[in-house]
Image (cartoon, grey):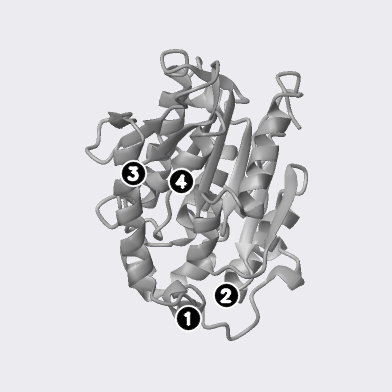
Amino acid sequence: MPSSKRAAAPGAATTTHSRPNLNSGSVTLASDPTSLPDRLQPPPGTDFAREYDVSIRVPDFAGSLAAWGVRGKEARAAHPAELDLRYGPAAAETLDLFLPAHGEGPHPLLVFIHGGFWKRLHKDDFSWIAPPFIERGIAVAVVNYGLAPATTLDEITAQTRRSIAWLYRKAAHYGIDARRIVVSGHSAGGHLTCMAMATDWPALAPDLPQHLVAAGIALSPVVDLAPLASVPVLDADLDFNPERVATLSPILLQPATDAPLLGAVGGKESAEFRRQLALLENGWAAVWKGAVAMPEDDHLTLCDAFGRPDSALFEATIELFDGLSD
């Protein structure tokens, strides 16, 4: 596991495309989509609209999402937190911070970025993730961000980066160990997690360290955006044009440091979501910590498992944090 003695990140490499200005730090492009191994390419004729319609494979999809909101409200009522902390100028740029009630600080921090294909859901729907972690002495920040189509994917990426930078700067104030910030996310949030890990933080601001993110956890992440251009209900709101695909697909980028990345995908998810995780394992092999086997989970129950203390995913996350203390 990495520590403060990790090697410095390499300098920027020559790239196929110009480096994007996302108003949020720079990234280094790694390759072109045609360089992906054949075994990681989607099969010809893939129905991407069906593959990325997660409701098809989730019993009572709408009911499950509604239940998240109820559980989130209950968690906020039961566990005092710093709510709606503003990390940026937009109205949606807020986060909730749950701090351990016991144990000596400074505490490690888990940042959670929600999914919803960048166009739905809210931080309030995910407060239930925090309680089992704060009981283990880990602070939790649940991040909100603007939604498409009102907010572009470029700006959503910039917003989530701002949230992480804000948490780093406020770490001492809230009793957080700035050396142990772990970023996690589900689905679209998994994409944003990987974008954070590809960020050259000192390029964003000189007070930010290269190793700002100590580790990452990507749950059912979308790291290859190209197929989403063939999903009308998503492309209409997010505009997956070639430039956006090239600059915002984590699989076409390089991780900025050697911070480890843990992944997971549900065994009952579509072939495309499983391919997305395989792409990450292959393309980011240098930092790949491993994938937690979750054979009985679908797209939503995988996220449920992240906040369930008896799950293999939760235990793997605790082990990841324990390693950061080495």
Q: Is residue 263 left or right of residue 326?
A: left
SS class of the residue under badge 2? loop
- Of tags 2 and 1, the one toward the viewer is 2
Alpha carbons under labels 1 and 3: distance apart: 26 Å
Residue highlighted by disc 4: 129
Q: As rendered, which of 151 and 121 lies closer to the eye? A: 121
Q: As rendered, which of 134 and 17 lies closer to the eye? A: 134
Query: Which residue occupies 22% across, 38% down?
Result: 91
Q: Are marks 3 and 4 in contact (CB under 8 Å)?
A: no
Amino acid carrying label 4: it is: Ile
Identify the mark nearer the N-term, 1 or 4.
1
Residue 145: which numbered mark, if any?
3
Q: Residue furthest bottom?
A: 45
Q: Are marks 2 and 1 in contact (CB under 8 Å)?
A: yes
Residue highlighted by disc 2: 270
Alpha carbons under labels 2 and 3: distance apart: 26 Å
Identify the mark nearer the N-term, 1 or 3.
1
Alpha carbons under labels 3 and 4: distance apart: 17 Å
Residue 50: which numbered mark, if any?
1
Identify the mark nearer the N-term, 2 or 3.
3
- Of tags 4 and 2, the one toward the viewer is 4
Above or below, comparing residue 189 to residue 22 in the picture: below
Amino acid carrying label 3: it is: Tyr
SS class of the residue under badge 1? helix
Query: Which residue occupies 34% across, 49% down?
Result: 72
x then y, percent, for residue 131: 45, 40
x then y, percent, for residue 119: 33, 58
SS class of the residue under badge 4? helix
Amino acid carrying label 2: it is: Ser
